[in-house]
Amino acid sequence: MFLFACLSQICATDQNTTKIQISKEMMDKHPIKPHHANISLTCINCHQGQGDDPEKFKAIGDKGCISCHGDKKRIAKRLEYMDMLKANPHNSVHDGPTLYCDECHNEHKKSTNMCLECHESEVKHWMGVTP
């Protein structure tokens, strides 16, 4: 949450040559999830190499997610305790490990639990809030 306390934040690319200014308005419009902010991730951690205009930053897709979280098989393995209820969305009986990360997870807005589309009554017993 400390990220939101500043009027603006200056991020540097990994080459430390370009300073990118992230305004409070931009941070309010595209907030960083608390579990990422708590480990000091900033806009540039995900959007490095996308230029110096935050208004032009693009979604990072699965490649960006797995660069930190590991590949989809590793994620499914880490959550395999959910398999006993056939409730591991990362190794679903419907899709296996083929779902795109952003089908459920979203950094800048509330995430969606796709399982709820068909399994509304069961999901509350299977899992908690989608991060």
Image: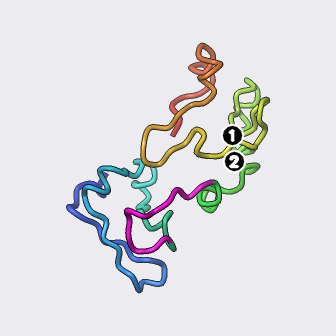
Task: Quadrant for residue 77, please give it.
Answer: top right
* Mark 2, other Cα within 10 Å: few <14 / some 14–19 / many ≥20: some
Q: Which residue is mark 1?
A: 79
Residue 56: within the magenta? yes
Assign a secondary structure to mark 1: loop
Q: Which residue is mark 2?
A: 75
Q: Is residue 26 above or below residue 95?
A: below
Q: Residue at x 76, y 43 (%)?
A: 97
Q: As rendered, which of 118 and 37 lies closer to the eye?
A: 118
Coordinates of residue 112 in the picture (x, y in percent): 53, 34
Magenta segment boundaries in residue numbering: 50-61
Q: Do the numbered discs 2 and 1 sit on residues whose CB atoms are within 8 Å?
A: yes
Q: How is the image coloured?
A: rainbow
Task: Quadrant for residue 109, please give it.
Answer: top left
Q: Residue at x 24, y 64 (%)?
A: 8
Amino acid type, residue under disc 2 in the picture: Ile
